[in-house]
């Protein structure tokens, strides 16, 4: 039995890993796969590893379907892969077990609902951005001036500036700075 969980959000828009949300399920599982990537696509290292490792008679346990896949097509493709290996699937939140005919049917219904929920979120996000743009409160990402950036990167690489000092000079976050350094 495997326990699979993915990124979940917490307050203030930050994200954290929530492996202990279903401690009883985790305790009964022989192997636990945790991905820090969102369930919005299937290109996730731990998901791929779990799919390679799963054997006939195993059961994949997830906290919720939306953590496993966010659109119907991805979910059904993942389920085909599991079914081909004769691997069961259980979702704790939806109380869903695909080893039963009813569970297989309900999986498709829940997949459609999860996809609809994701589309609603994206639609509200687009509407919010449009409203903010009209009000002049949203500019999008500001382009980084490469002429200013290069000397600062050179100073950082030579050890004349710390990352914090460099981020202040070019007014970007640390993650953006490290991405630029690469």
Image (cartoon, rainbow, N blue to C red):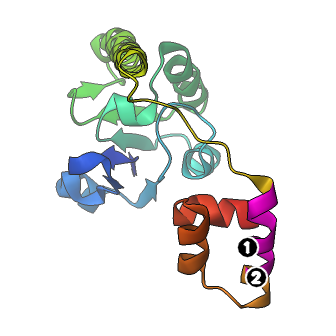
> Does the magenta run of residues contain 69?
no
Q: Is residue 161 above or below residue 51?
A: below
Find numbered disc 1 in the image and state the secondary structure of the residue it sits on.
helix
Residue 79 at x, y percent in the picture: 51, 24
Q: Which residue is mark 2?
A: 155
Q: Residues within 10 Å of mark 1 (few under 14, many from 20)?
A: many
Residue 47 at x, y percent in the picture: 55, 45
Q: Is residue 119 left or right of residue 43?
A: left
Numbered range of the magenta stretch: 147-155
Q: Nearer the viewer, residue 77 or 43?
A: 43
Q: Nearer the viewer, residue 106 or 20?
A: 20
Labelled pair 2, 1 in contact (Cβ < 8 Å): yes
Say which residue appears at 28% left-offset and 11% top-offset: 102
Per the picture, the main secondary structure of the magenta-coloured stretch is: helix
Q: Is residue 170 above or below residue 120?
A: below
Q: Is residue 172 left or right of residue 118?
A: right
Find numbered disc 2 in the image and state the secondary structure of the residue it sits on.
helix
């Amino acid at each position: 039995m495997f326990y699979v969980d993915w990124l979940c959000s917490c307050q203030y828009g930050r994200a954290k890993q929530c492996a202990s949300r279903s401690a009883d399920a985790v305790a009964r599982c022989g192997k636990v796969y945790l991905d820090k990537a969102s369930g919005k696509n299937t290109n996730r290292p731990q998901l791929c590893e779990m799919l390679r490792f799963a054997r006939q008679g195993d059961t994949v346990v997830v906290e919720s379907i939306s953590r496993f896949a966010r659109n119907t097509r991805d979910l059904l493709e993942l389920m085909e892969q599991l079914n081909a290996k004769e691997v069961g699937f259980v979702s704790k939140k939806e109380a869903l077990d695909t080893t039963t005919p009813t569970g297989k049917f309900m999986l498709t219904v829940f997949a459609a609902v999860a996809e609809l929920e994701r589309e609603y979120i994206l639609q509200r996000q687009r509407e919010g951005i449009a409203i903010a743009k009209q009000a002049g409160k949203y500019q999008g990402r500001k382009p980084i001036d490469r002429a200013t950036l290069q000397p600062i990167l050179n100073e950082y690489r030579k050890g004349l500036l710390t990352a914090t000092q460099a981020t202040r000079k070019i007014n970007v976050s640390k993650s953006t700075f490290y991405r630029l350094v690469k």
